[in-house]
Image (cartoon, rainbow, N blue to C red):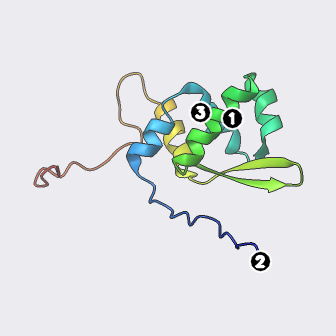
Amino acid sequence: MQAAVVSPPVVQKQPITADQVFKALGHPARTAIVKKLETGDQCVCELLKDLGLGWSSVSRHLSVLKEAGVVTDERRGMQIFYHLNLPCVTRFIHCLESSDPDDTPLPCCSFQNNSSASPQS
């Protein structure tokens, strides 16, 4: 009698949404992880050392970022490396962090106000 061949479950990728990304960035540790990944791929051990958090905390934060599509991971030998999947996120973070105290719009955050456009619901 032959053993039944079990196929791995089919995982369908969901589109990345702004809601998921903003929720994922809603914790200071996760924005710190994103900033670290801006310089290139990093293994979990490097993130642990740089962030000064425990293994379970870093793992959970990475999981949230991965689920939202902000980061991806890749196993290389015995280590798992994380990669920033949405580099636009770091540009947005830098734009917000360089905000002008007198509320003058920054070039990266400015937009043209189209008074004839109606808001979409």
State which quadrant residue 7 falls in: bottom right
Eyeballing the image, is 78 above or below 102? below
Tag of residue 82: none
Q: CA distance from mark 1 to mark 2?
A: 39 Å
65, 36: nearer the viewer? 65
Q: Residue at x 41, y 22 (%)?
A: 101
- Characterize the local packing of mark 1: few (<14), some (14-19) or many (20 or more) Cα atoms within 10 angstroms: some
Tag of residue 2: 2
- Which residue lies most toward the front here? 1
- Type of amino acid at the residue the image marks with label 2: Gln
Q: Position of residue 23 (x, y in %)?
A: 44, 37
- Type of amino acid at the residue the image marks with label 1: Ser
Q: Are marks 1 and 3 in contact (CB under 8 Å)?
A: no
Q: CA distance from mark 2 to mark 3?
A: 48 Å
- Type of amino acid at the residue the image marks with label 3: Arg
Q: Residue at x 50, y 38 (%)?
A: 24
Tag of residue 30: 3
- Name the side, left or right, on which 48 lies relative to 33: right
**Disc 2 or 3, which lies upstream in sequence?**
2
Q: Position of residue 32 (x, y in %)?
A: 63, 31
Q: Residue at x 77, y 44 (%)?
A: 42
Q: Is residue 78 visible?
A: yes
- The residue beneath circle 1 is 59
- Name the side, left or right, on which 111 lies relative to 54: left
Q: CA distance from mark 1 to mark 3?
A: 11 Å
- Characterize the local packing of mark 2: few (<14), some (14-19) or many (20 or more) Cα atoms within 10 angstroms: few
Q: Position of residue 111 (x, y in %)?
A: 31, 48
- Which residue lies most toward the right here? 77
- Characterize the local packing of mark 3: few (<14), some (14-19) or many (20 or more) Cα atoms within 10 angstroms: some
Eyeballing the image, is 60 above or below 15? above
